[in-house]
Amino acid sequence: MAEKIAESTGFEKVSVVSRIFPDGESYVRLEGSLKDESVVIVQTTCKPQDTNLMQLAFMTNAAKRNGARKVIAIVPYLAYARQDRMFLEGENVSIETVVSMLRTAGIDELVTVNIHAEGVLTRFPFPAKTVTAIPLLAEHFVKKGFKGAFALAPDKGALHIAEQAKGILGGESGNLEKQRDRYSGQTTQSAKHLEVKNKTVIIFDDIISTGGTIVGAARILREQGAEKVFAACAHGLLVGDAEKRILDAGVEEIVSTDSIPGKTSKVSLAPLLSETLKAL
Ligand code: R5P
């Protein structure tokens, strides 16, 4: 990702030597002169999240110690953003701790993609913005001949995402309802009536993790007569056998971005992130 961004922005590239010691601790060293430069560090923070976060903090500290004037972090997938408040008494607010650590390391500005809830950015200790990959995902489906497909959000929180997709697909949009048990983490979805009979439906979400949300939505869509069902997300965490479970539930294809590189990451974020950087 950093190479693609350097190529399209014309920014100079600096290599990073990184190692994991036998006890699991990370080591980083930047190879290049950063004196008085604005430095962009590209680091996604998918699994192993904690290692990737520590390495982001270490690279930032290294950049500042080597004379960088400013550090902008490009974090395509920002871990811990879903725990953005205390849902139950006694909990912590994970994202608050993560961004405080990044601030201490020296990050001056951060750009991420489809953060779970945008409102949290105002509580970050540095300027931060989230850009959306949903139009790119929708364009992918238009190119595949699915103009006019129904854009479905698996819960109310993702409705704004489905609406962004609708703007490109030109069909209808709607949402299901999802409830989460805050103690067990289990979710249930309600089968609300949708106008999907004989239609191609694309389920859009910010994250696919265990796949439970998509499997539940696909079952409801099948019951309501949808002809074809696809799944799209910005961040394909796809934990364990999530991909298989989703495909077994009758979903034709899963499409995600390269915020988390993998089999389903068919849409590259590099052009979007390059444009965002140029405009900062
Ligand atoms: C949470 O509400 C997110 O937007 C996703 O719907 C959720 O993370 C998906 O998780 P899973 O794939 O485990 O159902």
Image (tube, rainbow, N blue to C red):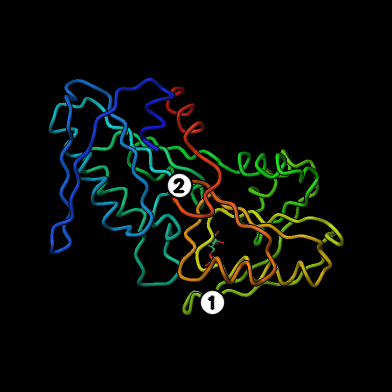
For residue 39, above or below residue 208: above
* 91 displayed left or right of 64: right
Residue at the spot 35% in from the left edge and 72% down from the top edge: 90
**Quarter of the picture holding the C terminus:** top left
Question: Can you give x and y, in whole percent of width and height, for residue 112 in the image?
Answer: 44, 42
- The image quadrant where one finds ligand 1 is bottom right
Q: Which mark is residue 76?
A: none
Residue at the spot 51% in from the left edge and 40% down from the top edge: 268
Circle 1 or circle 2, nearest the eye:
2
Q: Residues within 10 Å of mark 1 (few under 14, many from 20)?
A: few
Q: CA distance from mark 1 to mark 2?
A: 26 Å
Q: Disc 2 marks which residue?
A: 259
For residue 74, above or below residue 193: above
Which amino acid type is marked by label 2?
Ser
Residue at the spot 57% in from the left edge and 52% down from the top edge: 233
Q: Disc 1 marks which residue?
A: 186
For residue 251, above or below residue 37: below
